[in-house]
């Protein structure tokens, strides 16, 4: 009898049930899409933000030391210490090597062009590397993809250079011209526009800067672009304070925090000091948290709208069935029996609407992934029971007030038509 009553309810009130089911499916589909994107968005947004430059810088350890005696700074004058270029491939041997998008060494040298002192910066443009059996390319083309070059990129093993657009205007240089720097002829292959200090610099292969400076294999600093996760309480702890706790240390070391990657960079490059470019790293975490917060608000709004629609549909459906409720009570049905029928109908609606909403949400998530990130969104299997649970919650929350009202129907009043 119970099953027949539920079946007859769906058969006789198809439009009401369809309206409630559509409301559940719509709300759940939006929730599914937002949850799926939010759980898979970290790496994708991180990769998008990596197009705005490096988030870590490695410098010689000696450059971070300040030696003072009697208030007098005894730090050696001059350019200080240097890193060894031969140590740079070790970056691809560290634990989080696959999170390293790229790195670019820098060696600035002061040179004279047309009687004017300018900065020449040696770096990698797109240099081939090999570490073990793995081959890869890295340089400023990877770390700073927003650099715009009017012309062609120089080759790393050449005397070709880029000249910043402002410096090119001041010295009246264009693509194809020759610069005489330190007794060497350097051919300009392109005009660089970066919106930064590089617009007033000459960007040359690292080997050229080393030759001009007279320091073979020297590197002043290394800019690293790495995929990281936002900081939390564990990320902000001092690494030295965790070494006494192996479990805590492993959690920190094996998490892609910007500080743990910086620590591993120091291990990979001897006598170095690595730190985050704090403004860049903090902004990445802020952007990610704000996007996730916005998605949470959209999810809550969709579920609330769904609950309100279900509430309206169920209230109308129960009002139309008040005589049926009155008859069941007159025949001896208790409040629990009446409520169980309506809750069973709500549960069935939640299962059907939740399943349809889950499928629609998957399609919506994939469309968002293609439109925004040009890649697929990975849907975790555990999301299905979560979505069904949300559908149940929304349906029961929307139906509870109407079912409670049905339980208070007076059978005498209802059957007489007074209610």
Image (cartoon, rainbow, N blue to C red):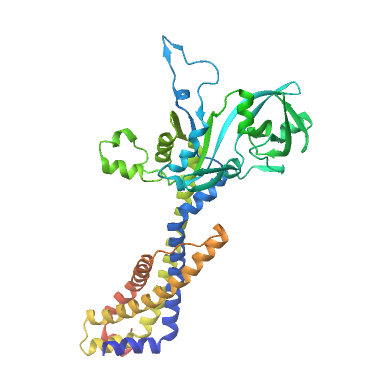
The residue under the point 46% across, 13% down is 74
Q: Quadrant of residue 13?
A: bottom left
Looking at the picture, does residue 310 appear above or below residue 220?
below
How many callouts does the rendering have? 0
Looking at the picture, does residue 32 appear above or below residue 236?
below
Between residue 374 and residue 362, name the one nearer to us. Answer: 374
Q: Quadrant of residue 115?
A: top right
Q: Quadrant of residue 232?
A: top left
Q: Position of residue 43 (x, y in %)?
A: 47, 52
The residue under the point 71% across, 43% down is 152
Between residue 292 and residue 140, name the one nearer to us. Answer: 140
Could you tell me if residue 227 is visible in this image? no
The residue under the point 76% across, 32% down is 178
Horizontal side, residue 124 vs residue 180: left or right: left
Could you tell me if residue 350 is visible in this image? yes
The residue under the point 34% across, 35% down is 239
Q: Position of residue 255 (x, y in %)?
A: 37, 46
Horizontal side, residue 324 vs residue 331: left or right: right
Q: Position of residue 53 (x, y in %)?
A: 56, 41
Looking at the picture, does residue 294 appear above or below residue 221?
below
């Amino acid at each position: 009898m119970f099953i027949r009553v539920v079946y007859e309810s769906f058969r006789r009130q198809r439009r009401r049930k369809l309206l409630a089911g559509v409301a559940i499916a719509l709300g759940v589909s939006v929730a599914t899409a937002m949850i799926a994107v939010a759980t898979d968005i970290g790496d994708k947004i991180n990769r998008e933000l990596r197009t705005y430059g490096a988030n870590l810088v490695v410098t010689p350890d000696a450059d971070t030391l300040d030696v003072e005696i009697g208030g007098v700074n005894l730090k050696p004058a001059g350019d200080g210490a240097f890193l060894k270029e031969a140590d740079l491939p070790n970056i691809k041997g560290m634990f989080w090597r696959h999170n390293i998008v790229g790195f670019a060494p820098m060696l600035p040298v002061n040179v004279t062009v047309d009687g004017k002192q300018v900065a020449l910066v040696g770096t990698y443009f797109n240099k081939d590397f090999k570490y073990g059996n793995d081959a890869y390319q890295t340089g400023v083309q990877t770390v700073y993809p927003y650099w715009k070059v009017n012309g062609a990129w120089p080759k790393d093993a050449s005397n070709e250079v880029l000249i910043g657009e402002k410096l090119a205007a001041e010295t009246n240089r264009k693509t194809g011209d020759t610069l005489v720097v330190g007794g060497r002829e350097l051919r300009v292959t392109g005009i660089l526009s970066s919106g930064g200090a590089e617009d007033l610099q000459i960007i040359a292969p690292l080997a050229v800067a080393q030759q001009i400076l007279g320091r073979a294999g020297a590197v002043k600093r290394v800019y690293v672009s790495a995929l990281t996760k936002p900081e939390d309480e564990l990320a902000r702890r001092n690494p030295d304070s965790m070494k006494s706790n192996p479990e805590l240390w492993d959690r920190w070391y094996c998490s892609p925090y910007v500080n743990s990657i910086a620590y591993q960079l120091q291990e990979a490059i001897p006598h170095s000091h690595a730190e985050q470019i704090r403004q860049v790293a903090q902004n990445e975490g802020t952007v990610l948290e704000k996007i996730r917060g916005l998605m949470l608000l959209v999810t809550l709004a969709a579920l609330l709208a769904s609950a309100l629609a279900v509430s309206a549909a169920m209230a109308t459906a129960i009002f139309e069935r008040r005589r049926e409720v009155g008859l069941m009570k007159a025949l001896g049905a208790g409040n629990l029996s009446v409520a169980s029928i309506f809750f069973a109908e709500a549960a069935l609606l939640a299962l059907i609407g939740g399943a349809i909403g889950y499928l629609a949400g998957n399609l919506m998530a994939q469309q968002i992934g293609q439109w925004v990130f040009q890649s697929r969104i990975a849907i975790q299997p555990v999301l299905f029971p979560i979505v069904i649970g949300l559908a149940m919650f929304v349906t029961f929350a929307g139906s509870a007030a109407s079912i409670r009202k049905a339980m208070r129907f007076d059978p005498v009043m209802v059957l007489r038509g007074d209610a």
